[in-house]
Amino acid sequence: MSRAASAARFLTQGTRLPPAKWEQAVEGILGQPETSACSLQRGLSLGSYRTAWRMARIIREAMQAVEWPLLSGEVELCDVNLAPRGRATKSIWLAIERRRISGGLIRGWRDSHNFRADLRCIVTALDPDAKVITSPSGLFRELKTLGFRQRSEPLGTNDALPAAAAVAIAFRRMLQARRHHGLATATLDLYLGEFVFRHNAAALGWEPAEQRRRVLAALRAPRLSA
């Protein structure tokens, strides 16, 4: 076995559950966005809550790992603070294709509090010909040095970054539906990855069968260990 092969691992590595159980769990989570570990445990007749919780986490990691086309056309870019007023900032970055007829593709990242690092994540998701639409903040000037076309639009008006505002509201509603008043970093990453998957799958018109296929493929795809 090669060194690279020996370093490869699967998301399901270390679990003893049969493939049929994983397929049922994927179908359950995709079909019911608010599926909890408790309901998964009951629905699959699992022996422990911890097993169900781990399955849900691994499936959301697979949703997070699905690859998407580059964002193109006009792309709105902004950061969104999810923390209630008076609490420490917990921000995410959102990049959304602006389309007139249907919802465009999106990307989302947790704010690392390192603007240059966050900008590198954003740049890797954009088509070189995309036009980036941001707030007037000077922070975004570096996008032009990377070769991207940029246009600033003032915040606070009804038509400013409308796609980004709609996506931010939808993500907040998802978190509220799951009754989260505070989120650990890892949990926020998983829920944001799940939200991006559900939004983009709908934008691309994927049927439930195609969504299951993509998530199961991500579960089975080998990855290099750190």
Image (tube, rainbow, N blue to C red):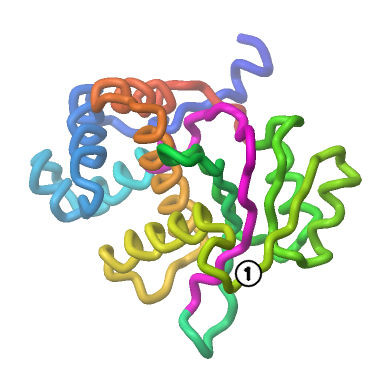
Can you give x and y, in whole percent of width and height, for residue 133 in the image? Answer: 68, 51
Position of 177 compared to 192: left or right? Answer: left
| Relative depth, front residue between 56 and 149 | 149
The stretch drawn in magenta includes residue 81: yes
Quadrant of the drawing holding the N terminus: top right
Q: Residue at x 44, y 32 (%)?
A: 11
Helix, strand, or loop for circle 1? loop
Quarter-of-image position of residue 17: top left
The vertical placement of 99 against 152, above or below, is above
The vertical placement of 188 against 41, above or below, is below
Residue at the extreme top of the image, as rendered? 1
Position of 60 compared to 47: left or right? Answer: right
Quarter-of-image position of residue 107: top right
The stretch drawn in magenta includes residue 20: no
Residue at the extreme right of the image, as rendered? 145
Is residue 200 in view from this perspective?
A: yes
Quadrant of the drawing holding the C terminus: top right
Can you give x and y, in whole percent of width and height, for residue 167 in the image? Answer: 45, 55
Q: Residue at x 25, y 21 (%)?
A: 209
Residue position marked by numbered label 1 in the rendering: 155
Can you give x and y, in whole percent of width and height, for residue 177 in the image? Answer: 26, 64
Crowding around mark 1 (Cα neighbors within 10 Å: few <14, some 14 to 19, many 20+) is few
- What stretch of residues is rendered in magenta? 60-83
Q: Residue at x 69, y 57 (%)?
A: 134
Is residue 14 in view from this perspective?
A: no
The vertical placement of 3 against 185, above or below, is above
Position of 196 compared to 46: left or right? Answer: right
Can you give x and y, in whole percent of width and height, for residue 77 in the image? Answer: 64, 53
Amino acid bearing label 1: Leu
Q: Residue at x 63, y 33 (%)?
A: 72
